[in-house]
Structures are given as C-alpha cells and as structure tokens.
Amino acid sequence: MKSDLVRGDYERARRKSFVRAIASWLRRSDNALLAFEEMRRGIHAQSQRDGGLREVPIEHIVGSVGRYRDFDRAFLPRQARTRDRWESVDRAHRDRTEVPPIELYRIGEVYFVKDGNHRVSVARERGQAFIDAHVIDVVSPAPVESVEDLLDFIRDSDALRFYETTDLLRLRPGARIELTLPGQYDKLLEHISTHRWYLGNEQKREVSYPEAVASWYDRVYLPTIDAIRKTGALRDFPNRTEADLYLWTTEHHWYLHQAAHPKGESLETIVKEYAGENSERPLRPLLRRARATLPGFTPLSTPRREAPARPSSGSTPASRDSRGTPRGRPS
C-alpha cells in the first residue's frame, strides 16, 4: 500500500514537471535549473568558506552542481532515471525517518545543490519551506540577492568589473550601486580615483585604493543618496535608480560651479533643483513652465547659464574637491 502511495507521489511530480515544461515552452521562459560552475565562473566567484549548518529556504535553491538536467527550476523530476532514488527519499519521509542534511553552495542569497538533489525535490513537493543544509559560502564580488541579480551581473560586465575593482562588498557589506545606462560605472571609478588624489593632498600621505573607496562611499556617495531620499527626488525619474541620480546631480553641481553660482547650497537643495528642472515625469516640466508664466511668480533660484540635462558618456569632470564634488573642465 505504501509503495503505491510513493509511486503515486512520484508520478504526480512528473506530471507537474511535464505541465511546467509545456507552459515554459509556450511562454518562451527558462524552466531549467542553473548549473553551478557556469554561474560561479560568470560571476567571477573564487574563494570559499565554511558556512556551517543552517536552515535554508527551499525556494532560494536555484541550481545544482551535477544534476541540473535531471530537475526543473521547481526541482520537479524531469528524467525517468530519478525514480528509484526519489521514491526512496519519499518513502523515508512517509515513514518519518530522519534524512541527513543536504550540502549546498551559496552565492549571495541563492543556493546550489552539491549533494541532496532528490531530498530537495521531495521536500519541495511535500510543501516543506526550509531544509537543513551544510553550506559552503562562495564569495561573490557583486551583491546577489536573487537569481535575477545573478543573471543580470553575469550579463552586465561593467557592473561586475566595478564591484571587482573596488571590492566594495568587503569594505561596505550590504552596499548596492545600480546604474541603468551603459558606460556609467567607469564614471564612478573616476570619482573614486579623483577622491583618492584629493584625500592624499588633504592628509599629506599616500592613500590606499581600498581606503579611498570606503571614504568615497561614506563621504561622497552616501550623503548624496541621503539627500535624494530626503527630497523624494527619485519619484521624478521613473525606472531610474539612486545611483543614476547621484551621477546626474554630481555633474549638475559641477555646472553650477562653472556658472559661478554662489557656493554653500546644501546637497538637498541641489538635488531638489535638479529634479525640478529635469524631471522625467511627463507633466512636471509643463507645470513648472506654466507656473513661471503666472503674474507675480518669482523663481526660487537666481537665473544661471543653462546646463545640459544629462551628461554625455564622455563628459566627466577632470578634477574635484576633497569630497569628490566636480571642479574643473570636462575632458
């Protein structure tokens, strides 16, 4: 009788796998497990460390070392050869027999099965949310919080190079800098290098690159991001990121300096001004121009030489002050 139940469990899992395969084909979406070695090489993850025994959310297990062709993305069995081992594990669950922890590799917040693919498959099919696992952490240069992050960083070589060059995750765990336009990460690297030069002048000593990265992040990047959040400026730029707005307002600050605008304005004022003048919300510029035509309207800021709304990819300041604020002419 129990053998019939176990056999039924497996056949039901196989039917689900077949239905998912058809649906995936119709939607032209990827239903396959990710291959660990391919992902590890793609994200340039090298060093490893013991992560110990822990409970792992099963939905975060997205790939396998050697059995990625035997199961689909939901860990449903795709191959008939999985039957004997799958049914054996399922029988152990029905008998309430304790099964040993599985072994996983972890890259960021996603996991890959080193040993225990069938145990993951059965546990997931039975509705289990967590599973005990011995974890090996594989250190990624970029912040991977989901399978989408992992694939995006593999596709975006500029972002991956930025994280590798700066070692930002080691210096500031949890840091995340995302840009939506191509070629912009090189500008961030230039900001760091220029900040390093000024920091060395300020402190009369050689400043190491890691120290410059940490200082730039703490003294230049984060204060600007804080101003962006306080003003709510990102609402004016749908589908953009805080890092995009950091770059644009930094360039805007440089243009203000070139136009001999009085110094001393707060970051929040500069960010708010930039968002008001360059909003990507369709009605915002029209409303601003309409208000300007009203009788008795007085602009909040003094007129200044018009600056480009967006810096071109080749227009970056050649020098900055010790915080990294632009000073000088674009090259």
Image (cartoon, grey):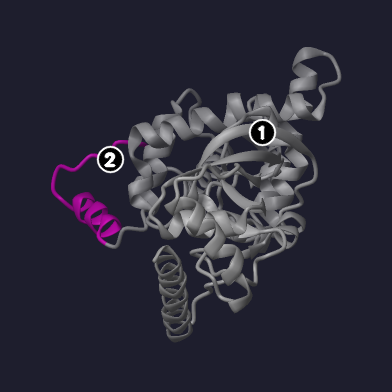
Rendered image quadrant of residue 268: top left
Three-letter amino acid code at the position of disc 1: Gly
Of 150 and 220, nearer the camera is 150
Measured as percent of width and height from the top left, residue 287 is found at 22, 55
Rendered image quadrant of residue 273: top left
Residue occupying the far left of the picture: 295
- Element carrying mark 1: strand
Cα gap from disc 1 to disc 2, whole angstroms: 58 Å
Three-letter amino acid code at the position of disc 2: Pro
Of 73 and 10, nearer the camera is 10
Q: Which residues are magenta?
A: 283-303
Determine the residue positioned at 71% across, 46% down: 162
Whether 117 is drawn above or below 102: the answer is below
Measured as percent of width and height from the top left, residue 320 is found at 68, 33
Measured as percent of width and height from the top left, residue 181 is found at 57, 59
Determine the residue positioned at 57% across, 71% down: 83
Residue 3 belongs to magenta span: no
Q: Residues within 10 Å of mark 1 (few under 14, many from 20)?
A: some
Q: Are marks 1 and 2 in contact (CB under 8 Å)?
A: no
| 284 relative position to 57: left or right | left
For discs 1 and 2, the disc positioned in front in the rendered view: 1
- Element carrying mark 2: loop
> Which badge, 1 or 2, comes first in the chain's sequence?
1
Residue 51's label in the rendered image is: 1
